[in-house]
Image (cartoon, rainbow, N blue to C red):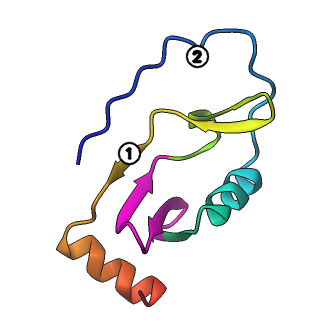
Amino acid sequence: MRIVTSQPWITEPEFSSPPTEREISKYLSSLRFLCFEVNPGVAMHFHRRYGIVIADLHVGNVLRSEGKLVPIDVVIGKPGPELRAKIRHLLGV
């Protein structure tokens, strides 16, 4: 899996106040991501259907543009066997 991104527009003034952690959590839930923590205070999100994990998704890595949340600079990937076992244990999936 490869994801190529470009962020030339990040410095433009069109962005309003950053979203809260709660707004980010609600957004990810609407996309069917399940939140879990391997380390206390460090949220990660797992999508059962696609088998992917998103990490480093916090208020500093999410912009708000025209009322929509725009994630930037997040880590996305398939969990390895050890992380997959922890996900299974924590989420029961």
Give the class, few, some or many, for how many residues have Cα within 10 Å of label 1's Cα (few <14, many ≥20): few
- Residue 15: say if magenta: no
Task: Give the residue type at disc 1.
Answer: Val
Q: Left or right of 56: which side holds 66?
A: right
Q: Residue at x 68, y 51 (%)?
A: 24
Q: Secondary structure at mark 1?
A: strand
* Of residues 16 and 5, the one drawn nearer to the viewer in this rendering: 5
Q: What separation in Å lies between label 1 and label 2 (alpha carbons)?
A: 18 Å
Q: Is residue 43 magenta?
A: yes
In the image, what residue occupies the spot 36% across and 85% down? 88
| Residue 44 image offset from top left, x and y in percent | 47, 61
Instruction: Identify the disc placed on residue 38.
Output: none
Label 1: which residue? Answer: 75
Which residue range is magenta in the image? 37-56
What percent of the width, then of the height, locates residue 15? 74, 21
Compared with residue 21, is residue 71 higher up or lower down, i.e. above or below?
A: above
Which residue position holds label 2?
10
Q: Residues within 10 Å of mark 2 (few under 14, many from 20)?
A: few
Q: Can you give x and y, in whole percent of width and height, for residue 30 in the image?
A: 67, 63
Q: Is residue 10 left or right of residue 7?
A: right
Picture quadrant of residue 93:
bottom left
Q: Is residue 87 above or below residue 22?
A: below
In the depicted view, which residue is nearer to us: 77 or 37? 77
Left or right: 48 in relation to 27: left
